[in-house]
């Protein structure tokens, strides 16, 4: 338990109290007991190098609750967030505000993965290649060139005019594989090197989970560290960590990596006499082999266990051919390694990819799950650890630091065992802080009766039928969240001609634009799947209803999940209650959390899945969502909106 009488931790609570500087200097700051308790717990964890899990309900003010003790600790602290957007918000808005109020004189730094920074060498190469771009891309390249002359950070988030999904970005940013390092002619002005240097010298470094785990996982392989050693790691949005950690402890090879290798090998031939004659044929053979393998995988499901590949002779043969061609290309690139810096790096890349592919194909260990996934034109092969607890435990032990995990959604009905078990957190300090919102007054949870089993063919039709009168009562202003893209598309078809409000459908525009247009519409109805369940903040009357179609159980076709469930069963744990239910509860809490975002919000949470009331485990879900009054009557929903102040 947290010791609230420890004098070392009481000061931070006073700073956030009603007589403290935040109450005096920050407009609309409201002292909250939950925030003060969390700040004390974080201060104690940093001082004692402890592991802490702190679940802080929406509105607790958790960002200030960890920033204040972090800045006052006198230690080097790394703060990691779930997304780059949150990272920017933390670094450019929250951190300067807290620093200013505390008068803290310390160095801070923002560090992202290298793909976020303009690479001056690759920009120069792209311009020199003089490829014929279509008009819009040529304009984007001109915009990037103009920006490159004036930017200090080289962070592509600064350049909103070039869309994040533009195919130009991969051509003017680097990857670990194609970076020339100290041999680059632009090394002295490199934005990645500058950002890393600032991070090495800073007291507080703001990163994102992708970068944190990429660095910690690489460090494990002996590549040296990007991030400075720290006394404390604070992981915000920590519910995302188990899945991300799985990605970074995996071995993976993708068609994209091999295609990039082939493209870069041909580009490097320019200016090296005789190289094209040696490499053109093997590079084209490799590209052809990738196409053959993807074609052989076409009849298979989009993702599955590696065994499915080995069971098909055509895939087996294509995979064997690809391995041989990649090994040959690695050898040939090695023969050119001394002729240019580029060839030296390409040789290392090809050797590393060839070795990784061999390991994945030949891996027979029971510690890993081997699996594949395919896209329209590409594929990836993976070997993922079955149990993340051991590598995560080892990682934390090597850092000898405090590890603080915080999010609004880490527990299942107040219990942290599932989260702790996934990450190998043995006997952590835990803290559960309720949201300060008055859910009994601000919200209503509607569980419609009469809906069929979620597997019924017409389930989505019935959900929309049940949701329409709720949308009528709220005059739009709703999120409809779905557990599958198929249900999302079907719902969009059904609503197209039935509602008078503007419809915003995931996939029809980038997420930030959809949200912006939804907020501006005032009465919109937004339909979203996975990525809209979390990290979306629409405060105020633009969002007054959240409808969730089904309990968000993970897809049963996930080969890693299937293997993990089998391993749990073998160890005597019920995989459904021990893994699937807790994971789905945390995901549902995320979706439900979209509704009430501040003290003035009011809204209805409509949970459609009849298993909530028909199955025993439904109680766990209902005990984990915000404590709103519940009803099964549509009339109560209509009365709730009739009582509301009329929207502007």
Image: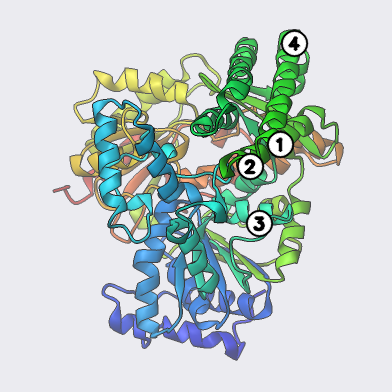
Label 2 to label 1, Cα distance in Å? 11 Å
Residue 232, percent from left and from top: 61, 71
Give left or right: position of 8 versus 498: right
Circle 2 is placed at which residue position?
A: 344
Checking the image for residue 351, the label placed there is: 1
Q: Reading the chain from its start, which is encountered first: label 4 or label 2? A: 4
Circle 3 is placed at which residue position?
A: 216
Q: Is residue 606 above or below residue 63?
A: above
Q: Reading the chain from its start, which is encountered first: label 1 or label 4? A: 4
Label 1 to label 4, Cα distance in Å? 27 Å
Label 4 to label 2, Cα distance in Å? 37 Å
Q: Is residue 648 above or below residue 574?
A: below
Q: Which of the two marks, 2 or 1, is nearer to us in this view?
A: 2
Kindly state the secondary structure of the residue where label 2 is placed: helix
The one of 631 and 112 positioned closer to us in this rendering: 112
In the rendered structure, are the residues bearing label 3 and label 2 in contact, judged by CB atoms less than 8 Å apart? no
User: Can residue 345 be seen in this snapshot?
Assistant: yes
In the rendered structure, are the residues bearing label 3 and label 1 in contact, judged by CB atoms less than 8 Å apart? no
Circle 4 is placed at which residue position?
A: 312
Kindly state the secondary structure of the residue where label 1 is placed: helix
Seen at 68% across and 50% down, the residue is 418
Q: Which of the two marks, 3 or 1, is nearer to us in this view?
A: 1
Seen at 72% across and 59% down, the residue is 395
The one of 427 and 644 positioned closer to us in this rendering: 427
Seen at 19% across and 51% down, the residue is 645
Give left or right: position of 543 versus 386: left
Q: Which of the two marks, 1 or 4, is nearer to us in this view?
A: 1
Q: Reading the chain from its start, which is encountered first: label 3 or label 1? A: 3
Q: Reading the chain from its start, which is encountered first: label 3 or label 2? A: 3
User: Can residue 628 be seen in this snapshot?
Assistant: no
Kindly state the secondary structure of the residue where label 4 is placed: loop
Decide: few, some or many residues near mark 1? Use Cα within 10 Å; few <14, some 14-19, many ≥20.
Answer: many
């Amino acid at each position: 338990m947290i010791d609230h009488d420890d004098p070392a931790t009481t000061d931070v609570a006073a700073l956030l109290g009603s007589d403290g500087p935040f109450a005096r200097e920050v407009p609309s700051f409201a002292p909250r007991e939950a925030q003060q308790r969390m700040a004390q717990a974080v201060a104690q964890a940093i001082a004692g190098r402890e592991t802490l899990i702190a679940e802080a309900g929406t509105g607790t003010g958790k960002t200030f609750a960890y920033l204040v003790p972090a800045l006052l600790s006198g230690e080097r602290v790394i703060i990691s967030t779930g997304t780059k957007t949150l990272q920017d918000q933390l670094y450019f808005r929250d951190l300067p505000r807290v620093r200013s109020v505390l008068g803290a004189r310390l160095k801070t730094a923002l560090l992202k993965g290298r793909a976020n920074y303009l690479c001056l060498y690759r920009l120069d190469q792209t311009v020199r290649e003089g490829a014929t771009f279509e008009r819009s891309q040529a304009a984007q390249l001109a915009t990037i060139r103009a920006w490159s002359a004036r930017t200090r950070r080289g962070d592509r988030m600064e350049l909103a005019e070039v869309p994040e999904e533009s195919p130009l970005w991969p051509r003017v940013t680097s990857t670990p594989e194609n970076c020339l390092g100290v041999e680059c002619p632009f090394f002295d002005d490199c934005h990645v090197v500058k950002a890393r240097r600032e991070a090495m010298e800073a007291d507080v470094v703001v990163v994102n989970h992708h970068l944190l785990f990429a660095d910690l996982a690489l460090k494990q392989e002996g590549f040296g560290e990007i991030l400075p050693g720290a006394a404390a790691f604070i992981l915000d949005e920590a519910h995302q960590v188990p899945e991300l950690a799985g990605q970074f402890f995996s071995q993976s090879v993708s068609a994209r990596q091999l295609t990039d290798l082939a493209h870069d090998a041909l580009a490097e031939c320019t200016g090296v006499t005789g190289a094209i004659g040696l490499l053109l044929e093997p590079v084209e053979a490799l590209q052809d082999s990738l196409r053959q393998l993807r074609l052989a995988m076409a009849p298979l499901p989009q993702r599955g266990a590696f065994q499915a590949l080995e069971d098909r002779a055509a895939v087996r043969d294509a995979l064997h051919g690809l391995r041989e061609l990649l090994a040959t290309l690695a050898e040939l690139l090695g023969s050119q390694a001394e002729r240019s810096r580029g060839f030296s790096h390409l040789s290392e890349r090809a050797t590393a990819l060839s070795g990784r592919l061999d390991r994945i194909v030949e891996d027979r260990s029971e510690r890993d799950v081997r699996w594949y996934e395919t896209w329209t034109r590409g594929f990836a092969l993976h070997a993922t650890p079955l149990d993340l607890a051991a590598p995560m435990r080892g990682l934390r032990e090597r850092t000898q630091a405090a590890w603080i995990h915080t999010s609004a959604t880490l527990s299942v009905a107040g219990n942290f065992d599932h989260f702790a078990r996934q990450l190998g957190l043995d006997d952590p300090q835990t803290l559960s802080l309720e949201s300060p919102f008055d859910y009994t007054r601000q919200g209503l949870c509607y569980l419609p009766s009469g809906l069929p089993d979620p597997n019924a063919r017409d389930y989505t039709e019935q959900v929309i039928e049940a949701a329409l009168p709720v949308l009528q009562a709220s005059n739009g202003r709703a999120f409809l969240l779905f557990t599958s893209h198929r249900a999302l598309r079907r719902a969009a078809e059904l609503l197209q001609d039935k509602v008078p409000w503007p419809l915003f459908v995931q996939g029809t525009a980038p997420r930030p634009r959809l949200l912006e247009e939804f907020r501006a519409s005032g009465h919109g109805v937004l339909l979203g799947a996975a990525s809209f369940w979390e990290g979306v903040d629409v405060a105020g009357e633009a969002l007054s209803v959240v409808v969730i179609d089904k309990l968000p159980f993970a897809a049963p076709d996930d080969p890693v999940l299937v293997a993990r469930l089998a391993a749990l069963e073998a160890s005597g744990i019920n995989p459904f209650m021990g893994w699937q239910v807790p994971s789905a509860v945390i995901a549902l809490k995320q979706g439900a959390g979209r509704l009430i975002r501040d003290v003035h919000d009011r809204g209805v949470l409509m949970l459609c899945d009849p298993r909530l009331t028909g199955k025993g485990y439904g109680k766990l879900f209902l005990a984990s969502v915000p404590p709103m009054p519940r009803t099964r009557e549509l009339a109560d929903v209509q009365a709730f909106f009739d009582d509301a102040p009329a929207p502007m």
